[in-house]
Image (spheres, rainbow, N blue to C red):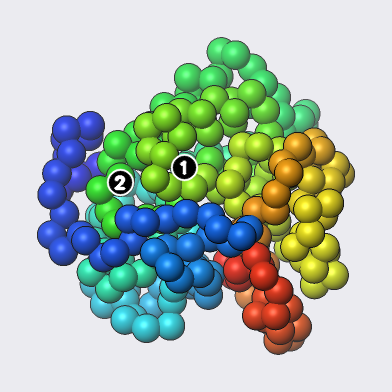
């Protein structure tokens, strides 16, 4: 990182950083900040506001939580500080994606290769050491579309040891224990409904080339769709069905429009 974020592990003081978001916990299968349930009514991380000065002038209302991959750009540095100031919630996502491997071999190849484990964990460590003092960040993400393997269990364990105050988010492990939040990608409304149940959360399946192991949790976890309603063309016609279900079902807490 650059600017005010130089210094890495030394830490720094964020101006206006205390937004009351430090108390993050799960209760009754839902994610809370202080005593309020968090709701993901997001904007894409790259397009938060129309116009050329998006990083300088984000909207003060209408966005509660956004998910973004870490990119060491000046705009992202400014965006984190503005999210602190406006009280917007952010899921900070490690810059890890191996989806392209599915075209030639297996997405799991690198995640289970011991000589790649350091490369995975270093990306998570750098993200946390750079961004941990931003009060807007309420969850860490292990990456996007990178299958599931031993490297993800290592990253999850490192995060829980070094920052137990924040939950961890990872879609591609399905119901396995390397995530505190169930975050399916493009589930149907019916599938989302089943994920509010324990059996629906720990099921084993194969979807889009991924193998999800059966989970072992004995309690339900919060459910936040990591991607849904791909907003291209005439693609968001059933948002009302998603949100009728989300508003009426405990533990379903919204999603990220891609």
Q: Horizontal and vertical percent for residue 123? A: 43, 33
Q: Residue at x 84, y 51 (%)?
A: 199
Residue of label 1: 94
Q: Which mark is residue 65?
A: none
Q: Residue at x 29, y 64 (%)?
A: 20
Give 133 or 52, whichever is nearer the viewer. Answer: 133
Residue of label 2: 131
Left/right placement of residue 210 relative to residue 112 reads right
Give 166 or 99, whichever is nearer the viewer. Answer: 166
Q: Residue at x 81, y 38 (%)?
A: 214
Q: Is residue 8 visible?
A: yes
Give the class, few, some or many, for how many residues have Cα within 10 Å of label 1's Cα (few <14, many ≥20): many
Q: Residue at x 61, y 70 (%)?
A: 254
Quarter of the image that includes the N terminus: top left
Residue 228 is drawn in which quadrant?
bottom right
Q: Is residue 243 above or below residue 132?
A: below
Left/right placement of residue 80 relative to residue 185 reads left
Q: Horizontal and vertical percent for residue 224? A: 62, 62
Quarter of the image that includes the C terminus: bottom right
Q: Is residue 46 visible?
A: no
């Amino acid at each position: 990182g650059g600017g005010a974020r130089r210094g890495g592990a030394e830490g720094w003081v964020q101006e206006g950083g205390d937004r009351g978001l430090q108390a993050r916990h799960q209760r009754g299968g839902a994610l809370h900040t202080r005593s309020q349930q968090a709701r993901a009514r997001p904007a894409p991380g790259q397009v938060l506001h129309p116009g050329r000065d998006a990083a300088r002038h984000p909207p003060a209302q209408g966005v509660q939580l956004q998910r973004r991959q870490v990119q060491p750009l000046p705009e992202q540095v400014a965006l984190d500080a503005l999210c602190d100031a406006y009280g917007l919630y952010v899921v900070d996502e490690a810059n890890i994606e191996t989806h392209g491997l599915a075209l030639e071999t297996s997405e799991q190849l690198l995640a289970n290769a011991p000589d790649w484990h350091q490369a995975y964990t270093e990306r998570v460590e750098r993200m946390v050491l750079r961004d941990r003092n931003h009060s807007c960040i309420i969850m860490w993400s292990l990456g996007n579309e990178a299958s599931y393997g031993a490297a993800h269990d290592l990253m999850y364990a490192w995060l829980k040891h070094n920052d137990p105050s924040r939950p961890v988010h990872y879609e591609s492990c399905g119901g396995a224990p390397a995530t505190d939040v169930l975050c399916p990608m493009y589930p149907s409304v019916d599938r989302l409904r089943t994920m509010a149940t324990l059996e629906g959360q720990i099921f084993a399946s194969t979807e889009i080339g991924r193998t999800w192991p059966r989970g072992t949790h004995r309690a339900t976890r919060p459910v936040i769709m990591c991607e849904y309603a791909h907003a291209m063309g005439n693609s968001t016609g059933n948002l009302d069905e998603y949100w009728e279900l989300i508003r009426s079902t405990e533990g379903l807490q919204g999603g990220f429009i891609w």
